[in-house]
Amino acid sequence: MKRSTVNILASYIDSLHPIIYINHFDFKVIDDTIAQIAVNTKCIEFNNALGAVDFKTKSPMYECDLEHFLRLVMDDGFEHETFLVLKDVHGELNNPKIIALLKRIAENNLYNDNYEATILIVSEIVVIPRELENYITVFDIPLPAISEIHSLIRTFTNDLGISVDEDVINDIAISFKGLNEFQIRQILNLAYQDGGCIDKDDKQLILKEKEQFIKKSGMLEIVNFTETIDDIGGLENLKEWLERKAKIFANLDKAIRFGVDVPKGIMIIGMPGCGKSLTAKATASLFEIPLVRLDVGRLLGKYVGESEGNMRKALRLAEAISPCVLWIDEIEKAFAGIGGEGSGNDVTTRLFGQFLTWMQEKENTVFIVATANDISRLPPEFLRKGRFDELFFVDLPNGEERRKIIDIHLKKRNKWNKSIDSIALIKETKGFNGADLEAVIKDTIERTFIEGKTTITTEDLMKSVKDTKSISSTLKDEISQIKDTVSKIDIKPASIPEKTL
Ligand code: ADP
């Protein structure tokens, strides 16, 4: 474990943090860290599976439950400087007796000069009972920085006696960002076994394995996509804004040194099926950074405080992977029920507050793209200036935009030809969204194929248009609700008005 981590943990203990929650999965790593700090300190360990165990040898000492254990050892702090190391006890942290015992130890630690016991809870799942919020400090082992990743790779290759170019190390080190030491070593091993060396080609393997780790953590999802900004028909204002920000991301280091603020993110609100998700993907492709999706529903845990712990982990992971685009799809659903009655809503309200604070304070290179259809139920503070760089409204495509969308989808399938009468199509597709237009094209191509034709005509397209029920007819009420809500807020149109095009 890095020296700095040991120092930070030691300083927490010295500055009277009575309960330190160490959020980590690898108990061996944590034991080593604690052992380095506990030179003159008695360590007493409780393991949820075995009861009291000897901290040094790990052999079971006596079987007991956590309550018993705490009662037995709580007064040790009057005799020696003591660490009470509790492993995997997150499931017990909803038990009022356990909470009361932990609180008593914590209060002794803080207010009794003759008492010197610190509780170290070690678990991969963070559960913080409300009653202990003021006593618990969560200690996250920081993920390795680029320079540390460099030295990890160098140590690994030196140990094996293989030489690797500095260029290669620089190149692959960036791909390891967001992973912990253990995971980095595991992937390096895999790469070495694969080809007997470490070279540039291993980057793909690293990215694939990294994706697996991030997937397994269940907090964030890496989204693979092929869409680019050219796949979006219309939304010229929004695209131009993104293209400007892309210049900052392309030279992030330089821009920051020049004094440019790192872009925080955008909120895209508007009609369903009009290119909001498409824009999230195109942003990542334009900025040339990975796209990761935050699914708030997935963060909800069954223990008290677990959801907040998960949110913290997810945001930390996003920071570690950064620069990246963090996409929150249908944000109004993710944070539905905020401020309402009931314990579920309580959790959502807290998660929302946590997310807002993070956004407000964030000084990292995570670019947020939040998308939403209807924001009438979102609290107004979310849209306040300073959180997002800009809010954009995506309306149903105007005529010129519909023409562009039709062209894009025909060209994508190699079926565009000069004879297609776009004016006629524009007239007949009023009220269609991008997804409707895409469906028209797919439908036409399928039909013409079945009919044995080789090219597509305006009439073929018209037939599909007539057979398609547009969003404006199927979701009439939702659409007027969205229009009504956005008319009340300060928001930029994503499109340029038709006549000025
Ligand atoms: P939403 O706004 O609900 O997120 P999506 O971006 O997922 O909608 O759009 C669904 C599909 O419709 C896209 O994958 C794309 O094929 C098509 N589409 C929607 N809007 C556009 C657009 N402006 N340009 C090109 N295709 C579009």
Image (cartoon, rainbow, N blue to C red):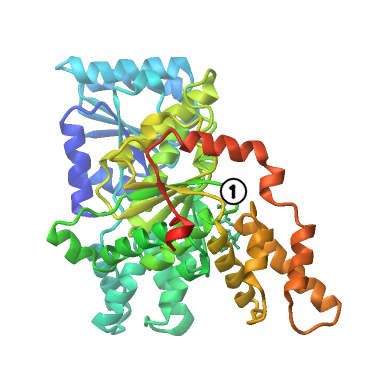
Q: Is mark 1 within 8 Å of ligand 1?
A: yes
Q: Is residue 454 left or right of residue 36?
A: right
Give coordinates of residue 220: x percent, y percent.
48, 51
Q: Quadrant of ligand 1?
A: bottom right
Instruction: Give the answer, above or below, for where 321 lies relative to 69.
Output: below
Q: Is residue 270 left or right of residue 361?
A: right
Give coordinates of residue 491: x percent, y percent.
39, 42
Inspect the image, locate mark 1, and give the three-letter code of the amino acid beneath it. Pro
Q: Is residue 169 left or right of residue 258?
A: right
Give coordinates of residue 51: x percent, y percent.
46, 31
Disc 1 packing (10 Å; few <14; some 14–19; many ≥20) = many
Please state, as top left, top right, bottom left or bottom right, where the N terminus lies in the image. bottom left
Please state, as top left, top right, bottom left or bottom right, where the C terminus lies in the image. bottom left
Q: Residue at x 23, y 48 (%)?
A: 5
Residue with the mark numbered 1: 272
Instruction: Give the answer, above or below, for where 181 lies relative to 381.
Output: below
> Is residue 89 visible to the viewer in this orientation of the structure?
no
